[in-house]
Amino acid sequence: MAKIIDGKLISAQIKAELKEKTAKLLEEKGIIPGLALLLIGEDPASTIYVSSKEKSCKEIGYNSIVRREPATITELEALNIIDQWNKDDKIHGILVQLPVPKHIDEQKIILAISPKKDVDGFHPESFGRLVIGMPGFVSCTPAGIMELLIRSEINLKGKHVVVVGRSNIVGKPIANLLYQKNPHANAVVTICHTGASDLRQYTKQADVLIAAVGVPEIIKADDVKDGVVIIDVGINRVDDPTKEKGYRIVGDVDYEGVFSKASAITPVPGGVGPMTIAMLLSNTFKSASGGF
Ligand code: NDP
């Protein structure tokens, strides 16, 4: 039976640690970490994400600056807001909630954020630093996965990790973190995507499987070997008339099916999800306390 890797608990521990360090930073250096959040438009999921980031900042003693702009804002106006924040010493981290409306070029927005305040870790400089093993901001979901593995004492050295998914925000950065030559990583990594004609051929070999696919329960019990550690990044909505909302959230892995085979597993929800905000706060603290 699998050990459950409890992301809610671990993220709460990280937030408690940050709260303590934030009080100390204020006492010793008079610095309050400041996170600026830009929300463009009224996408319901984005609105919830921004509000919960704002709430988390408040809980641990950060300043949060939230700009909620209509979807009609021009690209130039959005870039000007970022420019002002880049120059503001009280702001240590800048996050533009993605996706942005279609008339705004997402890449331009990401490039406009100073790499020194790039707490989402999406700037090419941050990603380049990660690839060559230089200190820098690591994007929050992959950083959260590493934290889950480290705090659950899962030793990765020499282990075969199979990552399913190669997105810029999850698959590619987590793969790069996992094979770095450092005591917390040093794994042998395989990256799978839709180009793999027989996905199972790869997933069956995994000592650690990271699923970041976005396809509900695509990974079944027959796709993994006994003792595998599973990190399920997927957040998928599936219809469920038995639920009040008419749907439920499932991961990319058939949790019930693999449970008896896996040695450890993250649940969905309550696994990787809660770690993302914790790592955003952690990156912001890093920036406020002197950078990397
Ligand atoms: P993307 O859609 O950007 O990437 C999905 C990846 O999975 C692609 O590389 C794609 O391959 C690959 N893929 C899709 N179908 C298959 C298949 N049948 N076989 C093999 N590979 C496949 O998704 P994201 O990385 O952004 O997100 C993945 C999941 O994680 C989603 O459910 C998302 O909601 C969730 N997520 C959760 C977060 C959190 O917990 N905080 C944060 C971010 C994401 P190809 O490149 O060939 O198209």
Image (spheres, rainbow, N blue to C red):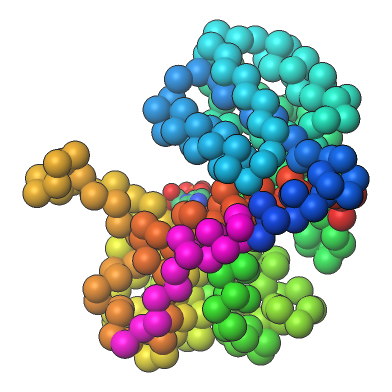
- Which of the 4 image quarters holds residue 37? top right
Q: Quadrant of the N terminus?
A: bottom left
- Residue 91 placement, left or right of 142: right
Q: Residue at x 34, y 50 (%)?
A: 236
- Which of the 4 image quarters holds residue 82? top right
Q: Position of residue 125 (x, y in %)?
A: 83, 46
- Residue 126 placement, left or right of 229: right
Does the stretch in magenta take in 54? Answer: no
Question: Magenta segment, principal secondary structure?
Answer: helix
Q: What segment carries the magenta color?
A: 1-16
Q: Residue at x 46, y 28 (%)?
A: 47
Does the stretch in magenta take in 7? Answer: yes
- Residue 39 placement, left or right of 268: right
Q: Outermost residue toward the front? A: 27
Q: Residue at x 44, y 69 (%)?
A: 6
So how many labels did they put on this image? 0
Q: Position of residue 118 (x, y in %)?
A: 76, 41
Q: Position of residue 86 (x, y in %)?
A: 84, 28
Q: Residue at x 67, y 87 (%)?
A: 157
Question: Up-down: is 84 above or below 52?
Answer: above
Q: Position of residue 292 (x, y in %)?
A: 87, 55
Visible in this render: residue 201?
no
Q: 240 or 22: nearer the eye?
A: 22
Question: Up-down: is 269 above or below 221?
Answer: above
Q: 191 or 101: nearer the eye?
A: 101
Visible in this render: residue 254?
yes
- Residue 23 placement, left or right of 45: right
Question: Up-down: is 201 above or below 195?
Answer: below
